[in-house]
Image (spheres, coloured by chain):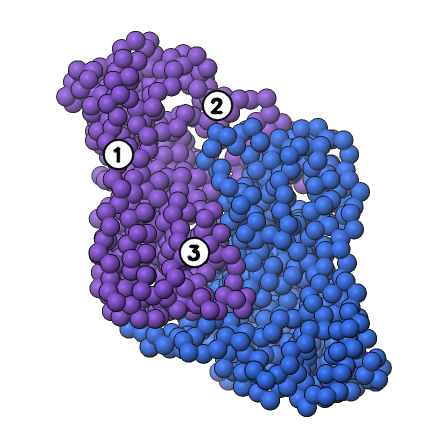
Chain colours: A blue, B purple
Amino acid sequence: MNGAESLLRTLVAAGIDTCFGNPGTSEMHFVAALDRVPGLRAILCLDESVVAGAADGYGRMAGKSAATLLHLAPGLGNAWSNLHNARRADTPILNIIGDHARHHLQYDAPLTADLPALARTISHWSHTVTSSCNAASDAARAAAAAGSAPGQIATLILPADCAWNEAAAPSPPLPPAPAAPPSNAAIDTAAQLLRAAKSPALLLRGAALLEPGLDAAGRIAEATGAKLLCDTFVPRLARGAGCVPVERLPYFAEQITDFLAGTDLLILVAANPPVAFFAYPGKPSDCTPHDARIHTLAHPHENAPAALDALADALHAPKSPQRRAPLQKPALPSGPLNQATAGMAIAALLPDQAILIDEAATNGLAPYAFTANAAPHDYLGLTGGSIGWGLSAATGAAVACPDRKILCLHGDGGAMYAPAALWTQARENLDIVNIIFANRSYAILNLELARVGAGVGGSHARAMLDIANPTLSFTDIARGMGVHATRAETADAFSQQLAHAMQTPGPHLIEAAV
Amino acid sequence: MNGAESLLRTLVAAGIDTCFGNPGTSEMHFVAALDRVPGLRAILCLDESVVAGAADGYGRMAGKSAATLLHLAPGLGNAWSNLHNARRADTPILNIIGDHARHHLQYDAPLTADLPALARTISHWSHTVTSSCNAASDAARAAAAAGSAPGQIATLILPADCAWNEAAAPSPPLPPAPAAPPSNAAIDTAAQLLRAAKSPALLLRGAALLEPGLDAAGRIAEATGAKLLCDTFVPRLARGAGCVPVERLPYFAEQITDFLAGTDLLILVAANPPVAFFAYPGKPSDCTPHDARIHTLAHPHENAPAALDALADALHAPKSPQRRAPLQKPALPSGPLNQATAGMAIAALLPDQAILIDEAATNGLAPYAFTANAAPHDYLGLTGGSIGWGLSAATGAAVACPDRKILCLHGDGGAMYAPAALWTQARENLDIVNIIFANRSYAILNLELARVGAGVGGSHARAMLDIANPTLSFTDIARGMGVHATRAETADAFSQQLAHAMQTPGPHLIEAAV
């Protein structure tokens, strides 16, 4: 067996069964080994931005790493921005990057670059294989690094000769570092502080936002009156009917400051203190009230649900929270189509256990609000702020959860970054409804232009924020990639098209004219 | 005036008049200053891959830097792969990257990353502005770095507060380092070696491949019998009727070795010795015959045309070369459409002074051969090997040369990386004919799979090289972005559509079914 095959067998032994990739010549031995190694599903994406976004969506929903297969430094460059989003979500991802054979690097052929340096800028762990005999053991280490709590970006560079030369055997899996046990001292202090606080709040993230964590947090809220909060952009949040509700922090810094006014205790549960997304002249970046006590109950790599449960016990909280979101589906809307009516239709039609991917930016607010009491679902946010993620993340989430409906809410500006994700959705017949909110503008930037003190903008400035000319037709673009697509200009049409898409398996795209 | 305005005025003073960009909140003061500073044309691109590819195409044709405007580290990540292609072409580019305000970085907001480290992986020169008062002088240094011979990637990171705080005045331009004068010793040695050589060749690159350089090289060829060669992938080559012809090195290593067999002297003119694009098991990477003498006449940063002229004089060569490519337009083809008939139609219909952008991969061979005797034109190649460049490079070349027709030959796989370039072509009404060779495959990889010794591939492997399912419709995709598009399935239809597109200003796309 060659190095590539030993590496693939090691990945499978480590529990990695999915690889999103876009290979080139330096990855051909990895590709050929796919036919000799059962158990690794390879999914072709038409650019590496899709590869990385899909691996992110997959990892958030599967709770384990996908592998990516990337082609030298330019392949990693194309993947970089969606890996950034994944890194900010603590998503486990194992990148396998083919590189030139070691003896070939000295010749500085056209695709040569400083790949190890580039890998370090985006990876928690990175390494270059130095012999085909080490490919398997390096892959085992990489898989363990990716899977270590809370989830990491691990990058293994595989020179072509280390793939094609002979190797001995695959490596047995190495255990990833599990979530660290909670700190008793942190729990005791939290209990004391909560008993004394007048207006406490818990800011939850990571595993604390899945059902066991939310249940434990709900117990604490009922025992202490603490508010339960989450960041504006969460990796994953269980919400909808039956879930313990959390309040989302608003986006703008001064809104967060207003929202937290009066809070005298902020307990961090696998979260960081809330800060402004961007800086603005004369406005503070730190949004926690200055007289509030901040206490860390659990760091991101610690077992947050266990910490919450232990804290609830210490507070003699009820065994199960009473307060859960009721199911309240709105009526299907009529009249003009806007984010409110779209949100009502989405909330009304969202099936049980759907997965909601949100890169709708300014148009995501009403859908988020209306789905608070929709059927139970998981919600995934744009954690790293790099637009062009949603269509790809939806692709990966659908691969991870083939029995669940995926609903992807997307802005039109962001959707133009990696529309090729639609092709993989069609190729794999994934059960995804993509909704593009076509306002033909980078709408958020029209707000930000004034907010940063740059005025209202003249004609040249405004032209840089306006994508109306020429008109983008997402129905044409989607059809060009094999995805069924319609356009809705009224709430009624939107509801009808969404109902049809919800009932019809496979990928769909609805261009919502808002 | 604020830092952003002082920076813009400095760019304009340094002769930079074009900025391709995709801004975000941290760039709003730069955007607002566009209305206060005349002389800088800002062109919106829908992702940063298009931004960088366009800046590359612009720089190669304008012979000077465009600015790019990028949004934090993810924006640079998206631009990385096309900046790599530009770096390999010695294209001058000045990246302006907005970053968080300096006091905001400590809060590790979602878009935060190690931007300076990322910038170093792709830039010849990089720097972070530390005060609004320095923005102008730093911009002057950056513009000089970008423009220094032979052309560099210069990256200036502009924290938002350094854009919005007050500044004094723009900076006067700094002179970029010009091409170094040729070395008399290198010229003398070259003359001696050429007189003694039996089978000499000159490998030309950079400015040596534009008309003055080619004329001088042609003089040498006529005085000595030396072959004139260029790399497979050239930044820019003047060719067609009236130009001194050069032979292009083939792509595969063993083809290069065969091609150069018997050569006893290889003179490098702003070029490196030819090497294999990829390594293959058991095959050498270095393709120069081992007993050949290699002599560097001019390094890339030296004045190669002057060196060639001086060498021609030293050899008492004729003042002007006799051998120039004749004009030989093929007849318009009939019958099946393939790269040969497509190449004939292109050669027949190519207008005078067109610019040919080639990312056609396997389908580019026949068009290249047939255009050798077409009307005079410039030819731009994929220097860095990172696919997804051509549509964007065509966009930038058209901005640089509004009076010339641009013909972009593209593979279908590569075209799916950054199809959004088409939208900017439509928005700016650029005179570009995009030809997509739709073979529905990463065809080169089917060859490479066997060449690297990985066999013919099983069904899983072949699926990773095959983009036929689902069918991509480039006409739908192009229309979705406002570009006139047709599909040709015969040589006659292709010729008719190409003739129409050549006569009709504005962007067109022809999907060539090959």
Tell me the amino acid under the disc marked 2: Asp
Q: Secondary structure at mark 3?
A: helix
The residue under the point 25% across, 28% down is B182
Q: Identify the residue at the far bottom of this view.
A: A198
The chain carrying label 1 is: B
Q: Are there few (<14), some (14-19), or many (20+) residues within 10 Å of tag 1? A: some
Confirm whether circles 1 and 2 share one chain. Answer: yes
Q: Can the viewer see residue A275?
A: yes
The CA distance from mark 3 to mark 2 is 35 Å
x then y, percent, for residue A258: 54, 86
The mark found on residue B180 in the picture is 1
x then y, percent, for residue B466: 58, 42
Mark 2 lies on residue: B286
Mark 3 lies on residue: B48
Q: Which mark is in front, 3 or 2?
A: 2
Q: Which image quarter: residue A209?
A: bottom right
Left or right of residue A101, residue A60 in this image = right
Tell me the amino acid under the disc marked 3: Glu
The CA distance from mark 3 to mark 1 is 33 Å
x then y, percent, for residue B120: 45, 48
